[in-house]
Amino acid sequence: MTKFYPAQAADFIRRSQNSDGGWGYEAGRVSLVEPTGFGAIVLHSGGAAAEAARSLAFLKSCQRPSGAVGIGPRDEDGNWMAYAALLAFQALGAAEETAKLAAWALAFEDASARFTPEEVKVIRKRYRYRPTIPGWSWTPRTTAWVEPTALFIIALRRAGVPASEKRIKSGLDLILDRRVPSGGWNFGNPYSTSFELEASSMSTALALAALGAAGFSARQAAVAAGFRFLRGAWPAASARLRWPGRSWP
C-alpha cells in the first residue's frame, strides 16, 4: 500500500501556491475556487497563517455583491465551485462572507421550476426521477445533479445551516429520488431510457456524506444500500468505513 505523508503533502501545497494566493488543479495552472478552497483549509489547519490569509484574500476577490462565487474572480454568475469557498470561509472564520454565500446558495436557482408538464412527464417515464425537486446544478438555471447537490448540502451544514432548512430538505429528497435501485448513486440519473445505470464510488461517497451531514441513520435503507455498494466496489477499504455510532467490519 502506498504511504501518505501529510507533512510533505502540505509542503507541496504551500510551495505550489500561485502569486495571486490561489491554486489550479495542477502546480502553475490558473487559480480556481475549488482547489483554492481546499488549499486554504489545509494551510490554515497546518498553521501557515500568511499563506492561508493570501488564499482567503483570493477567495474573497471571487465573491460578488450578491454573495455568489464562481470559478474565479471574473465569474459574475456563480456556480458549483462556490461550495468549496463556503467550506473555506467557514473554516477560516470569514463570517460575513460565509453568511452572504450561504444565503446565495440557499436561493440558488436550478431548472426544477422551468420544466413544462409535458417535459416532466417524459423525464419521469424515460429516466424515472422527479425533475421538479429543487437541488443544485453545475451552473445556475440548469438541471440539478447528485454531486453538486451533495456538495452544497455538506458545505451548508458545515456553515451551520440546519438540516431542517427547506432547501436542504429538498436537496436530500433529490438525492434519495436519484438512488440507483441496486445500490449507490451516479452523478445524475438512476436509469437510461431502457436500463438501470451503474452507480459510481465518487457519487455514492458524496451522497452518503451529505446524508450523514443531515443526520441520517446508518439503519436507513438508502445509507445501508450505499455502503453495500461501496463495500463491493472497494472491498479492501470496507474495514475503514465509518458512520456516526457504527462501523462496517
Image: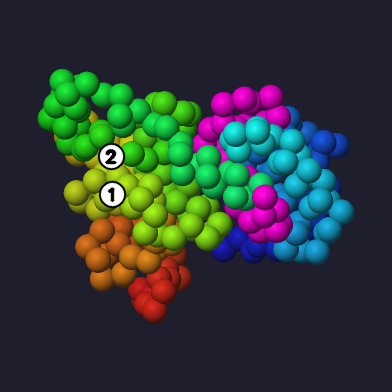
Between 247 and 5, which is closer to the camera in this rendering? Answer: 247
* Res. 36 in view: yes
24 or 173, nearer to the observer: 173
Does residue 160 sit above or below 87 in this rendering?
Answer: below
Q: Which residue is mark 2?
A: 133
Residues at circles 2 and 1 in contact by the CB criterion of under 8 Å: yes
Q: Considering the numbered disc 2 on the image, is that residue within a helix, a strand or a loop?
A: loop
Height in image: 135 above or below 224? above
Give the vertical position of 20 relative to 249 (above or below).
above
- Residue range highlighted in magenta: 70-96
* Residue furthest to the bottom: 245
Callout 1: helix, strand or loop?
Answer: helix
Give me the disc on residue 109. Answer: none
Q: Tag on residue 173?
A: 1
Q: Residue at x 25, y 66 (%)?
A: 220
Q: Residue at x 30, y 62 (%)?
A: 223
